[in-house]
Amino acid sequence: MERALALPRLPPHDPGTPALSVVDMHTGGEPLRIVLAGCPEVVGPTLLAKRRYMRQHLDHLRRRLMFEPRGHRDMYGAVLVPSELPDAHLGVLFLHNEGYSSMCGHAVLALGRFALDFGLVPAPPAGVREARVNIHCPCGLVAAFVECEGGHSRGPVRFLSVPAFALATDLLVDVPGHGKMVVDIAYGGAFYAFVSAEKLGLDICSAKTRDLVDAASAVTEAVKAQFKINHPESEDLSFLYGTILTDGKDTYSEEPTANICVFADEQVDRSPTGSGVTARIALQYHKGLLELNQTRAFKSSATGSVFMGKAVREAKCGDFKAVIVEVSGQAHYTGTASFIVEDDDPLKDGFLLM
């Protein structure tokens, strides 16, 4: 039997660059890399100010964690920061291959478990089977509810969204290579364009991922060029995050409805997309296709993983009629790591293949 090597705690590295310690998780197949230690202080009086600060001053850390050789084009991350909201247990900045998101449902589901298991919130009293975790996301305060036993997480997590609403329905957009088509735009903490994959000549469940990515990206670029996105309360939230291709089955059914989300720089969500499910439910409720507390199953066409969702009550966002949406799903731990830098490494801050 070969003898195991006795490795030092960390390999040789630049002593002036702290190691980045992370916990890795996934929700429905979509990864989440949570930074435990090694990130400098993210400065700013508000969470949105911290988001701007990280983009301007610490973006090399996003690239180092998300890009190859430590990550990949579709890696997703979270940096935990203090929140200015008195009710928040933690604040979070979301990282992806292009920058910084305003909301991420799969990450909230994972962070609910993480916050309970790593002591960021107190364990509930004996006999209480669910712990509440208030997570301040750039879009606002999101409450996650974590099933637990003996002070530790178990089973699925659910969250209650910020007010979600339909921004535009039946919007005619000229998509290069596909012609004019009708799309919807809705907000679930981030703005998405929605269109049936069939309108683009694709089957959501059998088409090649590359073909779905190309079609969704064409829709995203067309909408960005032809329609101005405005959030009623914050310019920081006024951008189109991506396009969600669906199976077109928006009328209520007990059978799962499938979709795939392509966001940021052609990044593909492996999960059904928590904020996308939120926006899609708001859209279906707006169209009269879904009633309050009517639960639907949403399936990722990439992995087959499922989130459950329902509109639980009406709300307002500016002048828009909105709904609060509950989304539930299962997150899992996959490992831990410490990432280091050698000062003579020309690729130390990462790279992506085009």
Image (spheres, rainbow, N blue to C red):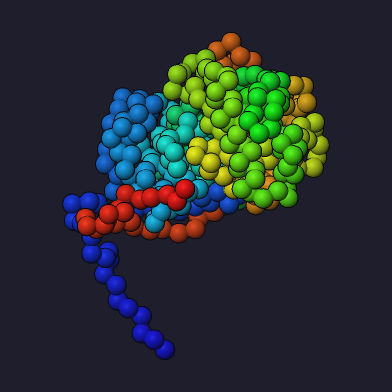
Task: Name the spot of residue 314 as percent of width and height, x first.
Answer: 65, 19
User: How many numbered tags mark residues here?
Assistant: 0
The reply to whether residue 113 is visible in this rendering is no
Task: Name the spot of residue 118 as percent of width and height, x first.
Answer: 42, 49
Residue at the extreme left of the image, as rendered: 16
Task: Name the spot of residue 159 as percent of width and height, x first.
Answer: 57, 36
Residue 268: name its quadrant.
Answer: top right
The reply to whether residue 264 is visible in this rendering is yes
The image shows residue 87, relative to residue 256, as above or below, that is above
Residue at the extreme bottom of the image, as rendered: 1
User: Is residue 234 rendered to the left or right of residue 224?
Assistant: left
Residue at the extreme front of the image, as rendered: 177
Q: Residue at x 74, y 39 (%)?
A: 201
Residue 340: name its quadrant.
Answer: bottom left
Q: Quadrant of the N terminus?
A: bottom left
- In this view of the protein, which residue sits in the foreground, 8 or 210? 210
The image shows residue 164, relative to residue 272, as above or below, that is above
Q: Residue at x 54, y 18 (%)?
A: 228
Q: Residue at x 18, y 56 (%)?
A: 15
User: Is residue 93 rendered to the left or right of residue 224?
Assistant: left
Task: Name the spot of residue 111 as percent of width and height, x first.
Answer: 48, 43
Residue at the extreme top of the image, as rendered: 319
Residue 84: name its quadrant.
Answer: top left
- In this view of the protein, which residue sits in the foreground, 274 or 156? 274
Q: Residue at x 42, y 49 (%)?
A: 352
- In this view of the protein, which residue sits in the foreground, 165 or 171? 171
